[in-house]
Image (cartoon, rainbow, N blue to C red):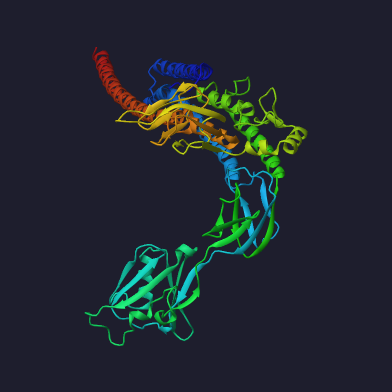
Amino acid sequence: MTTTSATTSSTAATTAATSTASTTTSNAAIGASILSSLNANGASIDTGSLVTSLTAAQKTSVETPITTKQTANTAQISSVASISSDLTAFSTSLNTLVAGGTLQTQPVSSATGVLTVAPVAGQAIGTLSDTISVAQIATAQSVKTSTYATSQAFDYGTLSLTVGTGSPISITVNSSNNTLAGLAQSINAAGAGVTASVIADANGNSTMVLKGQTGQAQSFTLTGSNDGTATQPSGGTSLSALSYDPAATTASTTMTGLQTAQDAKLTVDGVTVTRASNTFSDVIPGVQITLVGTGSTALSSTPATAAITSSINDFVSAYNSLLSELNTATAAATSTADAGPLRGNTAIRQLQNQLAKLTTTPLNASGTIRTLAELGVSTAQDGTLSVNATTLSTMLANHPNDVEAMFMTSQSSSASGVLITSAAGVAASGVYTVSGITPATNGGNATGSINGVAMGASSWTLTAGAGNNASGLILQILSSAPSSATVTINQGLGGALQAIHDVLLGTSGALTTLSTSLTTQQTALADALTKADAQVTVYHDRLVTQFTQMNTLVSGYKATSSYLTQQVDLWDKSS
């Protein structure tokens, strides 16, 4: 994959050419020094200095181009890592607010001593005006044993625990668990939904308390019976002392009941409702209710105007910050500064293009207001965003549900036999008609079209193809699927940001691929530098050998010359 543009390559070539010219000038200067030394009319040559100079010149010649590339590579890696990190923070920060329900209309209870309310993330609430009366809250059955010495042993046998209409669970009691602590541990390990705990008092005695789950259907019975064939421990307490049946007479129950299991009972706008738990979110759409006590309360709602306004301004600020970083990374070279490390990079261009589309991308499936641009977010000529506070305030006042929907990521199917299995936010917002649905039969594939375009099929799975607005949508077709269904996608701003993040930073995303390529280049350059350094060492050693041989020859020539001079002098004297 090509990760740098022609501009980046040109900049690198210019730098390399400058480096080469500098190296050539240095070599020329060293050559002149050598010639001067060799023409010194018999003066001795400092071969050590020559070897050092020549080696340094060779090192510069072969290693500078590599280190120049390493510097550029390091800058690119750092820039990609920073942009990737900021993009992740950009996409996840908003989703955190959405997931917490902060950007949704907030339900309000007039009597928090009766019940409290909270928004359900991803579900619209709208305007609430409900009256709720709570007759009783859900409770869990709890019972306790008599008080025993902490070390008191129980006889061997079986405890039979039954929850609701379920099958009895047998718990064997033997020498490994025949104390209150051991029995409590065995009951908890049975996984029946009944929790046992042992409470010690100040006198060194203990009581075991059993507690089930809330709801009438979670009522439990416990029956203890001795093993008539076992040799019982001395002084052991009969297991019959660990029996309780909420429906039996007092005579057959040896444990003490503390609380009975019951369902919550409430009336919502005149309709009676029962629930096994005190916390539920299936009575009023988008509202999680937690019962606290009995009495009456009125529900109302408060639009998240302030939270949405703050989030939009924060989004614009974060967007402009990320854009500034991208502009710096892709800046053109000037007379005083080099080009940005990612100048002309295709992956960064893709990111810039995706971000530029955000203000005009429909974020909810339907409604009068669907885009950030309609909400008052405008794009300047330099690409930065700004918020028109007046427009935003007007839209929040006149179209609160549409605005709120722009921050929700949700998806739904009109048919239970057509399941959406792709991640929420992957497909673009819209209402899609899936027609011509047939389940997979006889080892074949299911079939179906979305908005008239055939979907890809593999066994029971249908996938919307590229080029379709629903691209990325994956459906699982069950045998009960109807011939057609409607799929509603609310991508939301968080989903749109996450989609950009996943496309660029997914396993095969452009930024991920670029980062991998740059890391590979980093390793290759390090290897090249190691090899170049080894070549310089070889060159140095060769110079030392050659100059040593030369010095040996010169020394021999000088000895011969001296000998001949002496002989000539002798001849002259003898004549």
Residue at 70%, 39% (x, y): give it. Answer: 400
In the picture, residue 234 is in which quadrant? bottom left
Quadrant into which the N terminus falls: top left
Residue 403 drawn above or below residue 544: below
In the rendered view, would you say 509 is above or below 256? above
Quarter location, residue 232: bottom left
Q: Furthest-top residue in view?
A: 575
The residue closer to the viewer here, 28 or 46, is: 28
Rendered location of residue 485, percent (x, y): 49, 31
Tell me what residue is drawn at x 30 percent, y 22 percent. Answer: 546
Can you see residue 48? Answer: no
Residue 461 appearing in the image: yes
Q: Between 309 and 266, which is closer to the camera in this rendering? A: 266
Q: Nearer the viewer, residue 199 or 438?
A: 438
Position in image of residue 401 (x %, y %): 67, 38
**Which of the image's four quarters has the C terminus?**
top left
Q: Is residue 179 depicted above or below 531 in this figure? A: below
Q: Position of residue 422 (x, y in %)?
A: 46, 35
Residue at 24% across, 17% down? 567
Q: Is residue 37 left or right of residue 72?
A: left
Nearer the observer, 61 or 122: 122
In the shown orientation, is residue 21 left or right of residue 189? right
Q: Position of residue 108 (x, y in %)?
A: 68, 53
